[in-house]
Every structure is written in structure tokens, then in C-alpha cells.
Amino acid sequence: MLEIKGITVKFGGLTAVNKFNMIIEKGKIHSLIGPNGAGKTTLFNVITGVVKPVEGVVKFKDANLLNLKTEEIIYYGISRTFQNLQLFNFLNVYENIYSGIVHNFKGIYRKY
């Protein structure tokens, strides 16, 4: 279902992820573990389009996610959250929650 092949990410002279491979199968539980600085978050950022790798492929079903923008990847049901939770002060609780899933509702323009 999700196939990650040969992903390499570099930040200047630092290689954060080096030729990473993984296949995530539907209906199975997978985990990604490692010490701080191992590249786990960087890999999630690649999958969700936040960071572009210098090489490799990320495929979900038949789509190459690396060809899509972050805001397009969300329509495939792939997204991430960040540790620094910030709410919209001008919205109530319901509206803050809704803002994270609004793309799932009819009436919103969907290209996919």
C-alpha cells in the first residue's frame, strides 16, 4: 500500500536519512523506532510532503507522493501532526477540531 524506496535526505553536509526502504501493508501493524537523530521525523516529513528527498520514491497505491504538494497528499488520507499544538484563539473547541478534518466534507473542492 505505502512503498518507500531508497529515500535519502540531506541537510547541507548532514545526511539525515540514507537509502531508507520500507513497505507498509494494509491490515498490518508497523513501527519505526530509533534513537533521537535517527531520521524518523524526517522520514514522516518526506511521506507527507513537508521535506523533499534528494533521491528515492514514495508511492501510495499508484500515486508517487513526491510529485504532490502537502495539501494534495492529505486527500489520500495521509497527514501528520506536530508536537507544538497551537490552537486558533478566535475559534471555539469544535471549530479548532473541525479545521483539521474539513477536507473530508462535501462542498469542499476536491481534485482527487
Image (cartoon, grey):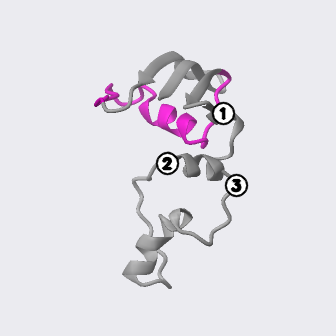
- Mark pair 2, 3: CA separation: 14 Å
- Look at discs 2 and 3 and give the one toward the viewer: 3
Task: State the residue position of label 3.
Answer: 111
Q: Amino acid at mark 2?
A: Gly
Q: Amino acid at mark 1?
A: Leu
Q: For the point 50% across and 85% down, which residue is it? A: 90
Above or below, comparing residue 18 to residue 16 in the picture: above
Task: Give the secondary structure at mark 1.
Answer: helix
| Number of the label disc, if any, that sits on residue 37 | none
- Mark pair 1, 2: CA separation: 15 Å
Above or below, comparing residue 13 to residue 103 in the picture: above
| Number of the label disc, if any, that sits on residue 77 | 2
Q: Position of residue 100 (x, y in %)?
A: 48, 64
Task: Give the secondary structure at mark 3.
Answer: loop
The prevailing secondary structure element of the residues shown in magenta is: loop
Q: Amino acid at mark 3?
A: Lys
Task: State the residue position of label 1.
Answer: 66
- Which span is picked out in magenta? 28-55
- Look at discs 1 and 2 and give the one toward the viewer: 2
- Mark pair 1, 3: CA separation: 17 Å
